[in-house]
Image (cartoon, coloured by chain):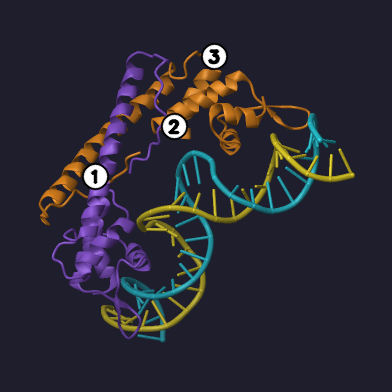
Chain colours: A orange, B purple, C yellow, D cyan
Amino acid sequence: MRIGELAKRAGTTTRALRFYESQGLLEAQRTSNGYREYSEHDLRLVREIQSLQAVGLSLEDARPFVACLRAGHESGDSCPDSREVYRRKLAEVDACLERLQGVREFLEARLAFQDPCLVPEPKEFLCS
Amino acid sequence: MRIGELAKRAGTTTRALRFYESQGLLEAQRTSNGYREYSEHDLRLVREIQSLQAVGLSLEDARPFVACLRAGHESGDSCPDSREVYRRKLAEVDACLERLQGVREFLEARLAFQDPCLVPEPKEFLCS
DNA sequence: GTTTGCCTTGACGTGCGCGTCAAGGTTTAG
DNA sequence: CTAAACCTTGACGCGCACGTCAAGGCAAAC
């Protein structure tokens, strides 16, 4: 299938697919006229990337999963590198949950009583 | 005090302060040589902005708080517009907490059993 | 033949909160 | 007098995952 059909079937855009290719996440055969030609396996790759993005992983984080699928594994997360990404992300999420809980309490307190003495900790707020 | 001292006392940079000014969040008197001159009240404003940023609010969100302080209120969050920002942010944080909980469970499940059948919901992942 | 709908590469734009030069003026210390 | 340490404006850079033209080629329908 060509790039337009792949985009439609994956529910994304041709621009995104070309971007994945530019990042080395997706490869394509070329027909004689230069058009990209994709297989069902490529669709599988794109879906993998999308589900990873859905849990907040970056395209960089998706590399090991793609490599794992390319290496012939049935699941992208059955390789050590992929599982390491999961572990790292889980730690990030836990840290984020903790901070957001603090933020939540701060906001509720401010809304309940307008007490100007409550000051939040100046920690970084990188929740992804 | 001049911009360097204000930056030092607020624990930020001169670049940030000039940026706040460009966004209309901070104003400064000018001395005869064109230098910015700040008061203790300006320091208070900067600290307010910083504490709002610490809970994930944008500079845009900080506007009502600054306006509230400028209007003479002792606390930046004692005005209706400010409290509305708090309420909106609280809702955002709650939504974020919910999604992150789902992400957490997904990651744990994937790490425990490598079951490729679990697929996350394609919802947006805008946790700020 | 020409319109339509695909496809190609390339380059710049987006949001947000600044960082990082660049090129210069001012004030103080030595 | 000179150097150091301030200050000024202006302009571009960053990260990230693309969106949005621009300018053109290819293939099939009318």
| Labels 2 and 3 touching (C-beta < 8 A) | no
Q: Is residue B46 left or right of residue A54?
A: left
How many neighbours does mark 1 have within 10 angstroms: few (below 14), some (14-19), or many (20 or more)?
many
The image's mark for residue A72 is 3
Taking the image as shown, residue B31 lies to the left or right of residue A113, namely right
Give the quadrant of the C terminus of chain B: top left
**Mark 2: amino acid:** Gln
Near-viewer residue (B51 or A105): A105
Residue at image position (30%, 37%) is B96
Callout 2 and callout 1 share a chain: no
Q: For residue B45, what is the image quadrant?
A: bottom left
SS for dot 3 = loop
| Image quarter hosting the N terminus of chain B | bottom left
Q: Which residue is identified by label 1?
A: B90
- As helix, strand or loop, the secondary structure at mark 2 comes to helix
To which quarter of the image does residue B90 belong? Answer: top left
Residue B68 horizontal/vertical position (percent): 21, 65
* Secondary structure of residue under mark 1: helix
Judge if badges 2 and 3 mark residues of a common chain. Answer: yes
Q: Nearer the viewer, mark 2 or mark 3?
A: 2
Q: Which residue is mark 2?
A: A53
